[in-house]
Image (spheres, rainbow, N blue to C red):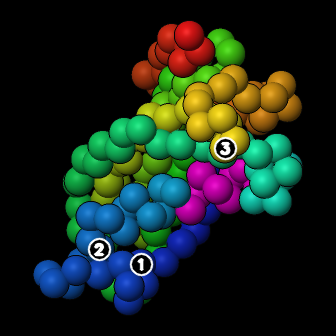
């Protein structure tokens, strides 16, 4: 699993003084992009390749509140992947400083050719990067997105 320490900041809070639902999605997106950047795929590389990750579905399960300025650990694992890498499902856990699971975000997506505006299989080195990510206990092989 890939993980990063983060903080629940002022902009992450809702009216009830705890982390808002869309902030969990933001943290999941941040950890995804940090993983890719730290493994040879910063934004500049995606721009050069003219491809990008596209999320088609997010699901959030909530377990415990996260309060302002609370340190959180955000983990990323692969919950599903097609053999060609054109489809993926990622699991992101947001864990409070006390070790309790606050939320789990499951994101399903693929790779978008930014010029053709269609789903594609990623280049071999990008697929290898996704494959290097730790698998969740419930990992499933997915069908390809390529028709």
Q: In this view, does 37 lie above or below 127?
A: below
Disc number for residue 19: 2
Q: Is the magenta stretch mostly helix, strand or loop?
A: helix
Residue that badge 1 annotates: 8
Residue 99 among magenta residues: no
Question: Could you tell whether 99 is left or right of 31 in the image?
Answer: left
Instruction: Determine contact: label 2, label 1, CB under 8 Å.
Output: yes
Q: Choose top left, top right, bottom left or bottom right for residue 138.
A: top left
Q: Residue at x 38, y 89 (%)?
A: 10
Instruction: Tell me residue 47's x, y (percent).
Output: 78, 54
- Classify mark 2: residues with Cα within 10 Å, few (<14), some (14-19) or many (20+): many
Q: In this view, does 143 lie above or below 124?
A: above
Where's the N terminus, which quadrant? top right
Whether residue 135 appears in this view of the structure is no
Q: Which residue is drawn at 25% across and 47% down?
A: 61
* Start-end of magenta stretch: 30-38
Q: Nearer the viewer, mark 3 or mark 1?
A: 3
Q: What element carries label 3?
A: loop
Q: Distance between the residues labelled 2 and 1?
A: 7 Å
Q: Which of marks 2 and 3 is nearer the N terminus?
A: 2
Disc number for residue 114: 3
Q: How far apart are marks 2 and 3 (CA)?
A: 33 Å
């Amino acid at each position: 699993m890939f993980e990063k320490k983060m903080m629940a900041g002022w902009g992450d809070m809702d009216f009830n003084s705890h982390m808002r639902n869309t902030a969990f999605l933001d943290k999941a997106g941040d950890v995804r992009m940090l993983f890719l950047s730290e493994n040879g795929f910063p934004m500049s590389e995606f721009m050069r390749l003219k491809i990008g990750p596209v999320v088609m579905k997010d699901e959030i399960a909530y377990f415990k509140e996260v309060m302002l300025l609370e340190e959180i650990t955000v983990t990323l694992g692969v919950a599903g992947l097609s053999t060609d890498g054109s489809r993926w499902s990622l699991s992101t856990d947001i864990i409070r400083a006390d070790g309790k699971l606050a939320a789990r975000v499951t994101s399903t997506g693929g790779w978008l050719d930014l010029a053709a505006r269609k789903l594609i299989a990623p280049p071999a080195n990008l697929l290898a990067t996704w494959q290097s990510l730790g698998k969740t206990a419930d990992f499933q092989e997915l069908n390809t997105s390529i028709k």
